Image: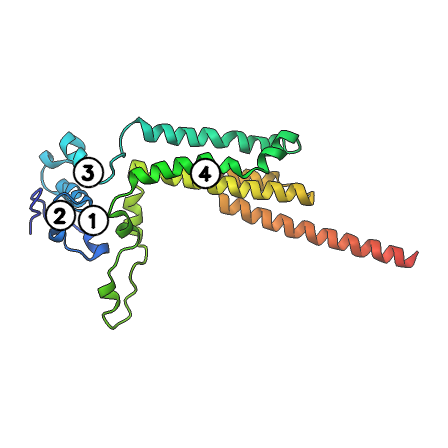
Amino acid sequence: MLCSDCGALRSSPRAFWYLNISGRPLKSLHPGAPGRQIACAHLSKHKTASHDVSSSPKRRAHVCAAFPACTGQGVSLLFSASTAYCVPFFAMMLFLPNKRVTVSTMHSNWIFVPLSIMYIALLIQSWTPETLQMIMPGSLQAGLAGKFNPQFFPKLEGIQFLFSQTITAASLWVHLLSINLFAARTAYLQGLHDQFVSFHSVFLSMFFGPLGLLSHLITQAVCAHKQQAAVKVDAAVNVTA
C-alpha cells in the first residue's frame, strides 16, 4: 500500500515505527499530525531521490513540523549556555573546595534555578501532542482485552527517535547536566560535612552522574567504617589505661 501523502511504500519497518509502537494506523491520523509527517518523511527515502529528506527543503520542513524549534540559533544558544553555566561550579568544587565562596555557593539551592528555566524552555518548544504517545505508547482498550498485554510502557524505538531531534537532544543534555551537578554537589557537601575526600566523586559526577554517586556512597561507607574502628580502638585504650 502507498502513503496518501508521499506515495511511499508502507512496508518499510523502520519508517513505520510510529505505527508499530502506537498501534494507530497512519491513515487514522490527521494529514497535518506530527506522527504522520514524521512517518511520511522517513518513508520518502524508500521511493525516489526526489523525495529525499536531505535534498528537499520542503521535505525537511515537513519533518521539523513535529518539533517547531528543531532549527534555529535559540536551541544552540541554550545548549551552550547550560554547559558554560555548570563549568564554574564543577571547577570550584574540584579546585577550590575549602574556599568560603565555594562553600556558600554550593549550599544554595538557587544554582539549579537557571538550569530548570532552560530545561522548561526547551521542553515547551519540543512538546507536541504526540510526544507522550512516543514515550509511553499503548491504548487502554488493548490493555483491557482480557490477556496479559502491558500498555503505556516506554519502548526503545520511540525514545530513540524522540531524542534524535535537535530540540529534544538539547533538553536531554540540560537534564543530564542538572543531574550530574546535583550528584556532584551532594558528594561535595557530604564530604565537607564528614571530612572525607570527595574530589574523585565530584570528578566522576561531572561526566557520569550515577557513577559519581556510586563512588561517593562507597567512599562514605569506607570512611565511616574507618571512623568506627578508630573509635573502638580509642575506647579500648581508655579502658586499658
Residue at the disc numbered 1: 14
Is there a contact, CB below 8 Å, between mark 2 and mark 3? no
- Number of numbered discs: 4
The secondary element bearing badge 2 is classed as loop
Relative to 65, does residue 147 appear above or below in the rendering?
below
Q: Amino acid at mark 2?
A: His
Q: Is 230 left, or right, of 219 in this rendering?
A: right
N-term mark: 4 or 2: 2
Relative to 62, does residue 26 appear above or below in the rendering?
below
The secondary element bearing badge 4 is classed as helix
Q: Closer to the camera, 103 or 83?
A: 103
Q: Closer to the camera, 156 or 133?
A: 133
Q: Residues within 10 Å of mark 3 (few under 14, many from 20)?
A: many
Residue at the disc numbered 2: 30
Q: Residue at x 8, y 43 (%)?
A: 5
Q: Residue at x 39, y 38 (%)?
A: 119
Residue at the disc numbered 3: 63
Q: Is 213 left, or right, of 232 in this rendering?
A: left
The secondary element bearing badge 3 is classed as helix
Spatial separation of the CA atoms under disc 2 and disc 1:
21 Å
N-term mark: 4 or 1: 1
Q: Closer to the camera, 220 or 70?
A: 70
Spatial separation of the CA atoms under disc 4 and disc 1:
31 Å
- Residue 3, image x and y in percent? 8, 47
Q: Is 133 left, or right, of 241 in this rendering?
A: left
N-term mark: 2 or 3: 2
- Residue 93, image x and y in percent? 59, 34
N-term mark: 3 or 1: 1
In the rendered image, the quadrant that contains the C terminus is bottom right
